[in-house]
Image (spheres, helix red, strand yellow):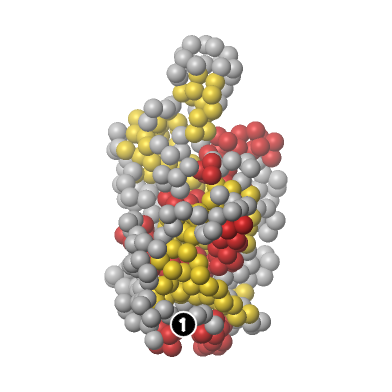
Amino acid sequence: MPAMAGIIDWGCHIAKHRLPLAILSGKPAGGGPERSLAWADEDAVTLAVEAARQALDGHDRSEIDLLAFATTTHAFEEKQGAALIAAALGLSTDTRTLDIGHSLRGAVEALLLADDAIRSGRARKALVIASDCRMGAPGSALERNGGDGAVAFLLGSTDCTATITAHAAQSEEIVDIWRRSGDRFVHGWEERFTSQYGFLEPSTAAAAKLPAAADDARRFWATSAPDQRSSATLARVLKANGDTMPTPLCGTVGFCGAAHAPLMLAATLELAEAGDEIAMLSHGDGAEALLLTVGKSAEKKRFTDSLTTRIPVSSQAAYRRARAIDPGEYPPLDDQGISATIHYRDRAEDLRLQGQRCSCGEPQFPKGRVCIRCGKKDNFTPEDFAERTGSLVTYTLDAFFPSPNPPTAVGIVKVENGPRIYLQVAELPGKEPELGMELRFVFRRIHDVGKRPNYFWKAVPAGRQG
């Protein structure tokens, strides 16, 4: 059995769209506070897939024996999100998958479970993902303070950047923040009450239960925080300064729910050096604390990169359309949606962008039985194309496809050493595609037929991920 376990890599994906808070008040955007916003084709699952792809970059995916997905905003009350994410990542069907929901501190439990699995020998490597898309009611503080993002940690037994050395918990029954089954928006009690009794007191109680800092170690703090004022108050109580507590995401990204403290952990891993300690605090019906010891300095700046790529939201109308807050002219059809049989048959193509290659060398997507080049039948090998780049061959602009910012670009994309695939081209704010432009592929929500999310891949301009 492995003698140790720890974080060996990570990835971050903060939703690229940024909503200036001034727009929510009907004012023009003026460079003030903003929040990250998952767009119409994004949700907790798509953000999770993107963060996980970064964490797995350069690693053998066949070694992942456990995938744990922590979120409070999965679209289904009964249907596992982790299995969907594993399929999109092309993980083995032998991979153990599990969801941890209903709690803002679910990521701590997921990290502990993964750590235990590796130490016990039940898993060679484990992937822990925390992702949330926070939706407050229009006009509420939760709408302004919320944020959308995801972070993924790859855990293993060798070459660890940080290892978990202590854990503490403080459980509290409190009705401060909640969302009932069927509710679209998160609800909250009076802000001073939720800050004092739902956040500050349990967080400081959990922090006090951690071992004292080693004499020769700096202790960093990676904490959740519902707003800027609460974060500043906690920093004073912990006696943490700007050098040991990264700048909170309030006013730039917002409070990202179950993903918030883990995102701050990723930010802190980029600052800490070998021998430093990181205390992660995550609140929600109490609080939990993890103490990690840093084994080496981070080489990658994935959290920093995820902050730099941003697409400004231009108007309140575009925001409302992206989040489907405005009532539609016609109610959405509530039926079984797309055939479950067809979904099952085509799931490899839809969820992992899997095509095939004939023995003659010709790649094809979607799959077929007869080669379009040599005419041979049933002589193919499956092949995944999602992790490659592509180039735009031709395109058209569709003004009728429902989109917050029409028209929608759709075109033929030539995959590197692969086939041509018909895809939507996204993340082109105010621009038209350029023929020959380099593209990469992202997992996105395509439509909601049957009042449930249906996923496929889109092409976006190649460049920095995150």
Residue 217 in percent (x, y) is at 37, 76
List x then y, in percent, for residue 20.
36, 68
Query: Considering only vertical position in the picture, is 33 above or below 212?
Result: above
Residue type of the residue flagged with mark 1: Ala
Q: Quadrant of residue 180?
A: bottom right
Q: Position of residue 340 (x, y in %)?
A: 69, 40
Q: Residue at coordinates 54% horizontally, 21% vertically from top-left?
A: 380
Local secondary structure at mark 1? loop
> Horizontal placement of 246 versus 454: left or right?
left
Residue marked by disc 1: 212
Q: Is residue 90 left or right of residue 245?
A: right
Question: Is residue 223 depicted above or below 310 in this figure?
Answer: below
> What is the quadrant of residue 17 in the picture?
bottom left
Regarding residue 444, the answer to whether it shows in the image is yes
Nearest the camera: 260 or 156? 156
Q: Quadrant of the C terminus?
A: bottom left
